[in-house]
Amino acid sequence: MLETSAEEPLPVRVISDAIGEYLGKLGPVWIEGELSEVSVRPGAQMVFMRLRDASADMSLSIMCHKSVLAATAPLPPNARVVMHAKVSWYAKSGSLTMSVKEIRQVGVGELLARLEELKNLLASEGLFAAERKQPLPFLPKVVGLICGRNSDAEKDVVENAKRRWPSVRFEIREVAVQGAAAVTEVSNALQELDANPDVDVIIITRGGGSFEDLLHFSDESLVRLVAGAKTPIVSAIGHEKDAPLLDLVADWRASTPTDAGKRVVPDLHEELTKIGNLQDRSLRYLTSMIGHEMGAIGQVKSRPIFKDPLVIVTARLEQILSLQSRALRAMENELAIGSEELESLKVGIRTLSPQSTLDRGYAVVLTAEGEIVRKASTLKAGDHISIKVAEGVVAATTDAALATSGKE
């Protein structure tokens, strides 16, 4: 470690040499990135270029001998490559450059293998699971749109959405959708729209392209950002055959930008037709219900009780009078029977009564005290007696002869 202080500073050359010495310890390294700004000057032996990170907005200055570049197959623009390079520090200018000894283009097969490995990793974490996907709103207040600058994909989404729902509002973020800055710009736009409370759904779209052009939409950092978004995401990348990982993690995958525009908003004419149909069904149902209830009311009104409310009283009165008549007849019958029985008893009583005996010519002798005389021996001469006959009483006095001859 260099010992310095404000009183004993080191000159620039010493510090620059120290930096070069420190960086020299790094040794050769393998670097992967996207190759850009390749500058081949006529007559020069060295080629200068920049190597960009595929997922971040940063790059390194690269130089190599023409022979190194010539030994590599012709590289397309923004080719993804792997370089074997060593840090070169130019102390005089204080600049850092990577000196390349070998360049290899990353093949499609290798990229597919890496993509499959990442896909399996994300799937194992449940980022593609159906239960974590959010439903799209029926009618969003604002639709967020992330697309290329002045792109056909933007026009397809906006025009098709407005054709279906003319009043739909958009928050559009035009970003780079290919190249080294694509992942960074798409991610920043997504974070901005996701933080906007008025945005109810976000569409990420771009037109078709090669496998390499769409590779940015399989970037792990972008895919994880989409998975963590609180706003529903619609992926409309490329065409039906294209399948970046963004399609798998998004809440809805549209086959094309046109399909995305149709998916995020309902069709006004279809909804008006549905409303009209529902109104017709409601009217028919209410009319049927009212008709049914009116029929029920008519049936109730047609009942005798409602035609003549007193019919229930009349019917009960008739029942009461009938019962009263039956009770009266029953009572008269019982009285007649009782009267007959009474007459029969009266006849029996008359037949057995003393008066009946008197009526046949017999008499009852009573003492002055009113006791019945049953034996003549109980009387003495001169006793006053009463003789009761059928009609009336005769007073008499006994004599001795009668009194002693009771059995004669």
Image: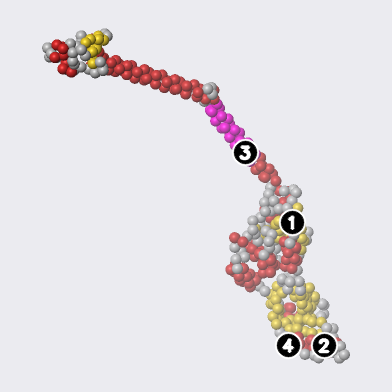
**Of label 3 and label 2, which has the lower sequence position?**
2
Dot 1: what SS? loop
Q: How far apart are marks 2 and 1 (CA)?
A: 53 Å
Label 4: few (<14), some or many (≥20) within 10 Å? few
Residue 114 against residue 399 in the figure, above or below: below
Which range is magenta?
277-301
Q: Which of marks 2 and 1 is nearer the N terminus?
A: 2
Q: Name the residue under label 2.
A: 15
> Toward the viewer: 204 or 75?
204
Determine the residue positioned at 62% across, 68% down.
122
297 magenta-colored: yes
Can residue 173 be seen here?
yes
Amino acid type, mark 4? Lys
Q: What residue would you read off at disc 4?
A: 25
Which is nearer the N-term, disc 1 or disc 4?
4
Q: Earlier in the sequence, mark 1 or mark 3?
A: 1
393 sits left or right of 248 in the view: left
Mark-to-mark CA distance, 3 and 2: 86 Å
Q: Which of 82 and 90 is in front in this view?
A: 90
Secondary structure of the residue carrying numbered label 2: helix
Using residue 38 as the reference point, say whether residue 265 is left or right of it: left
In the picture, the quarter occupied by the C terminus is: top left
Instruction: Determine the image quadrant of residue 79.
Output: bottom right
Return the x and y of residue 378 as percentages of the image width and height: 18, 18
